[in-house]
Structures are given as C-alpha cells and as structure tokens.
Amino acid sequence: MKTRLKTRLRAGLRAGNGPPGPFRPGFWRSPLRGPWLTSVFGLVLLVGLVIVAVTGLLSYAAYEPRLPGNDMTPGKGLLGFYLFDWPTHPAWLYRVTQGTHVVLGLTLVPVLLAKLWSVIPKLFEWPPARSIAQAVDRASLVLLVGGAGFQFATGILNIQLFYVFPFSFYPAHLYGAWIFLAALAVHVAVRLPRAIRAVRSRDLRRELRTRLADTRPEPPDPNGLVPADPAPPTMSRRGVLAFVGGGSVLMFGLSAGQTLDGPLRRTALLAPHGREYGTGPNDFQVNKTAASLGVTAAEAGDGWRLAVVGASRIHLSRADLLAMPLHTYALPIACVEGWSTEQVWTGVRLADLARLAGLPPGAAAVTARSLQRVGYFGQASLSTGQVADPRSLLALRVNGADLSLDHGFPARIIVPNAPGVHNTKWVRELEFRREGR
Ligand SMILES: Nc1nc2c(c(=O)[nH]1)N[C@H]1C(S)=C(S)[C@@H](COP(=O)(O)O)O[C@H]1N2
Ligand SMILES: [Mo]
C-alpha cells in the first residue's frame, strides 16, 4: 500500500504535476482569486501598513532609548539611526500616534488575512523554484509574510497582556519591523507597477454593482492567481469586499474606544483592561496595581522620603513637597498598548526639583526610580527638554484628590506627550544629571 502511494507520487512528480493536494494546479478553484482582487487588498495594506510602521518607529523614538536605562536593545544605534529628541508639544501627540498604531493595526487584520487568502495558491507552487530569480523572490516573500505575521502576533499578544514570548517585546518588535520593512520595500519595487495595472483593469464602482449571478472570473493571468478551472462563484466580489471591510469596521469599532476614552471606552470590547470606572477622582484605568508589583501602603506612607540627587542630595517628605509651589495641568496618560486617558494633575515642577538639586533645569536630565522592586518599568529617564517643560510634574494629586496607591501615591511623574511607561509611579528617587543636549 505504502509503496504504491510512493510510486504514484514519484510518477506524478515526474509528470510535472507536483505532489497531490494543494500542490496540484486544479486544487485552488475560487473564481474570485485574481490580480485585481489581490491588488486591491495589497494597495490598502501598503498605505495602512506604512502608517502602522511609521507610528511604530515614532513610538520607539518616544521611548528615548538613548537615555540610560530606558532600553537595552542590542544594535539599537544602527536601527535607531533616525532617533530624535521626542517633543513635549503637543501634549496629545503620542496619544494620536500610538492610538493610530494599535487601532489601525487591528483594523488591518481582516485585510491582511484576505490578502493572504487571495495568494495562497502561490504558496504551493510546484516546482518550488523555476529559476534563481524566482527562488530569490519567494525567499523575500517568506520574510514579508513571516515578518508581517510576527509583527501582528507580537503586537496583538502584547496589547492583550499575554506576555508569552520567550524574548523581550521591544527589541523583538523593533527587529521585526525592520525585517518586514526591508522585505516590503523589495516587494513594492518588484510588484507595484503590476499591482497598479491590475487595479486599473477593472472599475471598482462597477464591481460594487455586480451581483453574484453576474460574477465572472478575472481573465487568465500569467502569474497564476486566476484558477485554470474555476468553480462557480458562491460570493460576488462586492460580497468579499463587504465581508473584509465589515471585519475591519468591526475591529475598529471594538478597539478605538480605549484610545478615545470617555463614554466611548465602554465600546472597546477588545480592550483587556476595564471598560467602566466609577466617578471618583482616582477612578480611571490602572496599568499595574501596587499589590501586583509588591508596593505596600506602609512603605508609601508617612516614613516615605523622596531623594533628590544632583550637585547635592536632599530628602523631602510629602509635606515638604506640598509646601513647594504647586501647578495643575490636564495631561494624558497614553500607554504603548493603545489606551489613553486625560486627567487633571497637581504637583511640583520637575524643573523646580532640578533647581533644588543645584542643576539648571534647561540642562538637566533625570532618572526617576520607584519603590517597586519586581517587574519592569521601575525606573525611567527623561530628557533635558522633558525636565524643562513647565507642565512636567512630580504629581501628588489627581482631579483634586490625593493620588491613590494604585495611581502612584505618594508621588508619580507626569510628562506631556511622553509614553505612559515614562510616568513612573511611587517615585523614591530623582537623580538629575547635567546633559549636553
Ligand atoms: N513604578 C511603575 N510605574 C509605572 C508603571 C509600572 O509598571 N511601574 N507602569 C507605567 C505604565 S506602562 C503606564 S501606561 C502608566 C499607567 O499609569 P496608571 O496605572 O496610573 O494609569 O504608569 C506607568 N508607571
Ligand atoms: Mo503603559
């Protein structure tokens, strides 16, 4: 039995038919597959993924990875050639760029799946390589599809708080981004003219009016997307577009609320954090609770002192801080995971604390260290520009009340336009340094 199968397989291969199943040209029969449909999905992805990639690279810049302790990615000097001082104006910018990165990424998932469906016969092409050029082309597609899959998988797992990968998210997502972008550049250089010709080959408005009964396959194409022996259609092209577009609208609708915040947060069914909060001053999203990071009310209580280090080293109690000039600003917390929320914070200017440490605020960078001893994000460094902004605070109160323990009592950092992760909670030490830039 086994030998008979082997003989048949060998005979099939000799005849140029390839192995059975999906490798046979007659296996893939959807009458909708063709260069036009593939190119429509491809061009939507091209525009969308470039925006997702650019906002992602901006997010890496916003992390100020060149400052001490913010990022350990090996080789970041090369990959971060574009880094620049992340501005503090406008305060809402990171909310917009990171909200776009996450929400648009999720919105494109159905389009990516549809695009992969539309080209799946190419995955089973037989023989695997007809020429060296074709082998190189297919290898670049492994990087393109693999890169996209890796970026979507790690990104989605991260925003859903499943930290399951055996590596650190930041370097992995950054390396993945550059591999994907390089493969995309090759793909666009090779395919774009063909894709533009293909979308022009049919009139979109006409497709949107064409019913199932009038749906015909695209004309045979040299690249083998159109099946040689198409099955009768079970769905029109407009049906496919509506199905994929509807999926995208759904993904958008179920995730945008966590970026927009307010009453719309309730609509964010895909958001892993809570969707409804009370009406108290501290009732807004908590990223990590004090308990989950081992920060106790006792160590954040009366015995707490803030060490302010610079030219000198001084210790301040919460009463000392409350006796300093206090300032109030409405500023957002915008997390890398795409959620954001604006609250009204009251506290001491970081610039005033720099001055207290004997450093001119225009030339002082700072590292904030937390009471937290486990997990990540127990410290973050801020640039001279961030310290100098008058809205950058060591916040003591929020919405008129003392900070709750979960929101960082007795004191936390709030910096305009910084990623949420730089708003260190439960600060125990501020180390100011003189910096050239
Ligand atoms: N010490 C400490 N500070 C921290 C964090 C943390 O894990 N530990 N998380 C950061 C992240 S990722 C975000 S988004 C904000 C969230 O602030 P919130 O929990 O008050 O909403 O806090 C930041 N400050
Ligand atoms: Mo965050």
Image: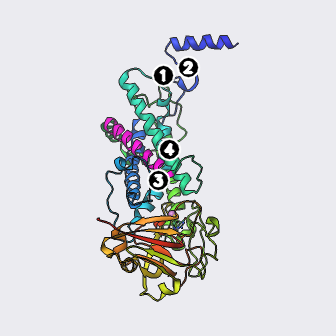
In this rendering, which labeled residue sits more in front, label 1 or label 3? 3
For marks 1 and 2, give the CA distance: 8 Å
Q: Please, what secondary structure does the residue beneath circle 2 have?
A: loop
State if disc 2 and disc 1 touch (CB < 8 Å).
yes
Q: Find disc 1 in the rendering and name its residue.
A: 126
* Left or right: where 263 falls relative to 298: left
Residue 310, by quadrant, is bottom left
- Asked whether residue 263 is in view, the answer is yes
Q: Label 2 amino acid?
A: Pro
Magenta-colored stretch includes residue 373: no
Q: Secondary structure at mark 1?
A: loop
Q: Earlier in the sequence, mark 2 or mark 4?
A: 2
* Callout 1: CB less than 8 Å from ligand 2: no
Which amino acid type corresponds to the residue marked 1 in the rendered image?
Trp
Query: Which contiguous range is marked in magenta?
Result: 169-191
Residue pictured at 66% horizontal, 11% vertical: 4
Q: Is residue 110 left or right of residue 4?
A: left
According to the picture, the residue beneath numbered tag 4 turns out to be 150
Are discs 1 and 3 less than 8 Å apart at CB?
A: no
Tell me which numbered mark, 3 or 4, is placed earlier along the sequence.
3
Q: Which one is in front in this view, the residue at disc 4 or the one at disc 1?
A: 4
Kind of element beneath mark 4: helix
Nearer to me, 244 or 115: 115
Image position of 126 with respect to 71: above or below: above
The amino acid marked with disc number 4 is Phe
Marks 2/3: CA distance?
37 Å
Q: Quadrant of residue 10?
A: top right
Q: Residue furthest bottom?
A: 323
Give the position of the C terminus as an image quadrant: bottom left
Q: Earlier in the sequence, mark 2 or mark 3?
A: 2
Residue labelled with disc 3 = 105
